[in-house]
Amino acid sequence: MAPVRGINKKRKVEKKDEDNSLASESSEEGSTEWWNVLSKKIIGNPSTSNGVDRFKSTFRMSQRTFDYICSLVKDHMMAKTHFNFSNGKPMSLNDQVALALIRLGSGNSLISIGDSFGAHHSTVSQVTWRFVEAIEEKGRHHIQWPSTDREIADIKQKFEKIQGLPNCCGAIDATHITMLLTSSDQEAETWLDYKKNHSMILLAIVDPDLRFLDIVAGWPGTMNDSSVLYSSNFFKLCQKGERVNGKKISLSNETEVREYIIGDSGFPLLPWLVTPYPEKELSKSELRFNKRILETHAVAKAALARLKEVWRMIRGDMWRPDKHKLPRFILACCILHNIVIDMEDNVFHETHSSSLQHDPGYGENVSISDDKNGSILRDKLSIYLSQKLHC
């Protein structure tokens, strides 16, 4: 399967329509009784926490967000053959969504999840895959590049508030999705990275709210960050001027600065991608500039860390994935990550400030690319920020 890329569609949830539709639903599937019955199966009878807290800790989201996800996938998931529990009782829409979310969120085996739900492991697999298909089809508009002046201006303003970088509209980073492949797999060697892990690369461009603006998934872990970027549709769009090519701004030193994104030293310096100065005999202003870049770039690392902390299936510890389906699992998890943010879900901010490193053990492969226009842009920014500091 070809690498999965973010699709440029409308992302924003229409709050009024969504709230009205959810308020009008009074079915058994949205009731408290449904959750009470299910929670006893999968959690037992904890004596301390209440039902709302158990719901949040189980699904890593509020019930409002859960209901919105159900509304997204309902038509797709309920249109085909229905699924049953092991006792023959039909699974409701909420049962199926809960099963899939726990599979994606826990990373536990099909058998252990099936045992806790009272469902056959093959049912867990089929329900999860149908959910991934549904989220991919109905939720892709939650990953998009900003399409309005207001959206991009908001992103730039928030980036500038971090460390003063003007006209920045994204931060890029990559992480390895490790897999457990058997030696009998004829393609296993292709996916063996320099840490001797079988892995797939996820490349992501992130906004200051840790939302994914664009992703690329599917390339083998043998590739470095620069190679994945060069192979991406995002790179092609930027090179053609169809992305990261909006309004220039005038700085106080009477120079203009174009739009750009930022990356660490693993990425190439390009006319629209600013990276730190190479670590060699740097001036004080260059060292300060590097610090600003890295502290601003931290949002990309935080987003990937949170993705892996919440959607543990793609941490790759406990399963042998179909390599052709894995990019779609990754995309589904990225969409879910954004949905929680787009729904302004306080649970996301309250419980998921992760200290997890998104790529433990993987060092930064320093790119040696040095584009002239990229150097000019970096110097302009460095001089501007240095002058601003001394004003």
Image (tube, grey):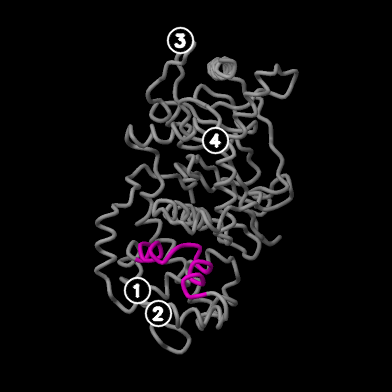
> What kind of element bears circle 4?
helix
Three-letter code, disc 1: Gly
Position of residue 332 measured from the top left corner of the image (x, y, whole percent): 46, 56
Name the residue: 37% across, 23% down: 247
* Residue under label 1: 30
Task: Tell me how far mark 1 sits from mark 2, CA to CA.
Answer: 7 Å
Judged from this view, the residue extending furthest toward the front is: 391
Residue underneath mark 3: 254
Category of crowding for the residue at label 1, using alpha-carbon neighbours closer than 10 angstroms: few (below 14), some (14–19), many (at least 20): some
Residues marked 3 and 2 touching at CB (< 8 Å): no
Q: For the residues marked 1 and 4, what is the alpha-carbon distance in whole angstroms?
A: 43 Å
Task: Give the alpha-carbon distance from disc 2 to disc 4, as whole Å.
Answer: 45 Å
Tag 2's secondary structure?
helix
Residue beneath disc 2? 34
Q: Is residue 186 left or right of residue 239?
A: right
Give coordinates of residue 324: x percent, y percent: 52, 56
Give amino acid for label 3: Glu
Picture layout, residue 223 above or below residue 99: above
At a point 51% along the width and 76% down the height, the residue shown is 122
Mark positioned earlier in the residue sequence (3 or 4): 4
